[in-house]
């Protein structure tokens, strides 16, 4: 019986010591890999078991003992199998450093073939067994086994076909039938897929090869939402509102550009298909939630109805309207007086603004005004919190501050016609009052003296808080700032000389 290390490599008195050291090394490697939960655990274990078996056989049995020869052959097979497994695990670890998921069918088949070759080589060299008759005698058994395992063999060959044709790669989002998920890898019988619900699906390779396969990992993926809009809303206006909503959604790609398609005239609404593009199909449901939520707020603010087939009966609609409208009017006027430049207006002057006051609701994360856009309205916060954001020189967004009730913003762009100097975004669901430029136009026409008073108050506050627009030619005092501001107001509202 020959040792694993051969008869000529080491002197007999050192051979056992070397085998003991190797057995200890592989045993410690097995323990370390097991504790780290790393690959290579099974290969190191087989090597350690092979050397340990060879160490136990050598002093126990004589050189011509048949059992010793069998055990020594088993030890040799274990060590060689362990070495092969270690090499495969190391190469697999190197190949997966940049990718967590991988297919294993080729590796498994090659590993199986190498195991068989090692076993045949040991039988041939150590036991003088000729494998040729063995192949001939097992031909009938192979045919019977092939018929019995026809389905499994079909899955194996289908898996090889999928691996060679590469319709998807590990990590891709795919759909097969009603199954949608991220591919983990192709194995002997099936392909592993993880769904959005973190469920692990094992789809048979033969089924996957026969079915229509959709791969969503082609760079960008389109998604759609359908919505019914009232016939009273012009389609071009609806398209404009929806496109602005999609432009404000950070997870929606702008290249390719979103599309709003008028698709159907229904019984009670015009149907629109909203198509937009995303970069990761795994986030499709979250993006759809963001888009659908933002659309509701945007359509509600623009007073665009999403109708549904109901029948509404109104009994005595006049009853109670007068007192409710008056109470709401008083409430709005009280909130408008929270703005310092409207505080001293008389009730009859303030009422001229009311027809152009709109109550708007914004959802969390929605952009209310955008830096650089033209502004024709100002906003007063009734409820919720908004944040002020400005662009730095490097193009990064910088958070300036948060605003809450009764803060207001947008008066500079409204009064001067200058672009918005900051972006305002809702931190949570917020309700705001919007005052349009038309309301102030009516006020200034009926009471021209109010324009100068309002201009002076706003300009003084701008100077005191160092928020004068960069377009102002001089910033050397409140009077210069007031003159510049009132001059802008005169041009915007087409007013004469203001004093």
Image (cartoon, rainbow, N blue to C red):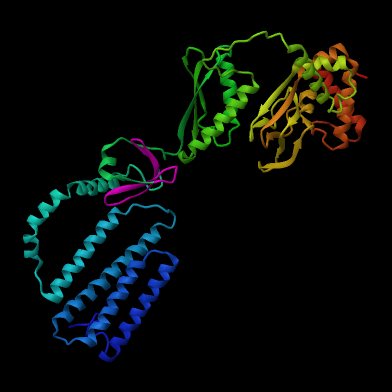
Whole-percent x, y for residue 224 in the image: 47, 28
Judge from the rendering whether residue 68 lies leftward or rightward of residue 454; answer left or right.
left
* Region of the chain picked out in magenta, as a range: 173-199
The quadrant of the rendering that contains the N terminus is bottom left
Q: Which residue is pictured at 30% across the width and 51% down the height?
A: 187
Whole-percent x, y for residue 189 in the image: 27, 49
Q: Which residue is pictured at 41% across the width and 38% down the height?
A: 216
* Above or below: residue 338 compared with residue 283: above
Q: Quadrant of residue 330?
A: top right
Q: Quadrant of residue 315?
A: top right
Q: Quadrant of residue 22?
A: bottom left
* Above or below: residue 352 compared with residue 189: above
* Above or below: residue 276 compared with residue 98: above
243 vs 273, nearest the viewer? 273
497 vs 175, nearest the viewer? 175
Q: Is residue 2 visible?
A: yes
Judge from the rendering whether residue 433 lies leftward or rightward of residue 347; answer left or right.
left
Task: Examine the structure image and report whether residue 174 is included in the region drawn in magenta.
Answer: yes
The quadrant of the rendering that contains the C terminus is top right
Judge from the rendering whether residue 93 lies leftward or rightward of residue 345; answer left or right.
left
Whole-percent x, y for residue 233 in the image: 58, 14
Q: Is residue 392 visible?
A: no
Task: Examine the structure image and report whether residue 449 is included in the region drawn in magenta.
Answer: no
Q: Which residue is pictured at 15% across the width and 76% down the height?
A: 126
Whole-percent x, y for residue 24 in the image: 36, 79
Majority secondary structure of the magenta segment? strand
Question: How many numbered circles are shown?
Answer: 0
């Amino acid at each position: 019986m020959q040792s694993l290390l051969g008869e000529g490599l080491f002197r007999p008195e050192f051979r056992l010591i070397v085998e003991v050291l190797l057995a200890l090394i592989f045993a410690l490697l097995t323990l370390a890999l097991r504790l780290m939960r790393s690959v290579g655990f099974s290969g190191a274990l087989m090597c350690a078991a092979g050397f340990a078996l060879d160490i136990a056989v050598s002093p126990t049995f004589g050189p011509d003992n048949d059992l010793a020869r069998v055990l020594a052959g088993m030890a040799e097979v274990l060590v060689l199998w362990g070495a092969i497994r270690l090499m495969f695990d190391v190469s697999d670890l190197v190949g997966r450093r940049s990718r967590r998921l991988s297919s294993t069918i080729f590796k498994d088949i090659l590993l199986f073939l190498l195991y068989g070759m090692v076993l045949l080589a040991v039988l041939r060299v150590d036991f003088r067994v000729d494998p040729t008759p063995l192949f001939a005698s097992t031909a009938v058994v192979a045919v019977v086994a092939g018929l019995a395992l026809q389905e499994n063999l079909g899955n194996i060959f289908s898996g090889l076909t999928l691996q060679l044709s590469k319709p998807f790669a590990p990590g891709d989002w795919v759909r097969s039938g009603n199954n949608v998920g991220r591919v983990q890898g192709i194995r002997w019988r099936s392909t592993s897929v993880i769904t959005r619900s973190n469920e692990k699906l094992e789809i048979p390779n033969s089924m996957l090869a026969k079915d229509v396969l959709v791969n969503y990992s082609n760079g960008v993926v389109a998604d759609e939402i359908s919505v019914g809009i009232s016939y009273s809303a012009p389609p071009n206006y609806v398209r404009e509102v929806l496109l602005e909503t999609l432009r404000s959604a950070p997870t929606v790609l702008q290249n390719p550009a979103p599309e709003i398609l008028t698709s159907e005239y229904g019984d009670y609404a015009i149907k629109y298909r909203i198509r937009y593009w995303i970069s990761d199909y795994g986030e499709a449901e979250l993006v759809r939630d963001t888009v659908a939520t933002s659309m509701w707020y945007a359509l509600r603010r623009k007073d665009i109805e999403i109708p549904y087939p109901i029948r509404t009966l109104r009994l005595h609609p006049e009853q109670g309207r007068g007192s409710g409208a008056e109470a709401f009017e008083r409430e709005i006027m009280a909130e408008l007086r929270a703005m310092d430049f409207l505080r001293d207006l008389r009730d009859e002057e303030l009422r001229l603004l009311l027809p152009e006051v709109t109550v708007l609701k914004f959802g969390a994360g929605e952009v209310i005004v955008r830096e650089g856009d033209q502004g024709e309205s100002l906003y007063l916060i009734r409820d919720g919190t908004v944040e002020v954001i400005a662009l730095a020189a490097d193009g990064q967004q910088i958070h300036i501050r948060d605003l809450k009730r009764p803060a207001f913003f947008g008066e500079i762009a409204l009064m001067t016609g200058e672009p918005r100097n900051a972006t305002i975004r809702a931190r949570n669901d917020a309700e705001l009052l919007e005052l349009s430029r038309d309301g102030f136009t009516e006020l200034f026409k009926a009471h021209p003296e109010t324009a100068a008073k309002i201009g002076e108050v706003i300009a003084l506050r701008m100077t005191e808080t160092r928020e004068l627009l960069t377009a102002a030619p001089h910033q050397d005092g409140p009077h210069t700032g007031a003159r510049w501001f009132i001059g802008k107001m005169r041009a915007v509202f087409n007013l004469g000389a203001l004093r």
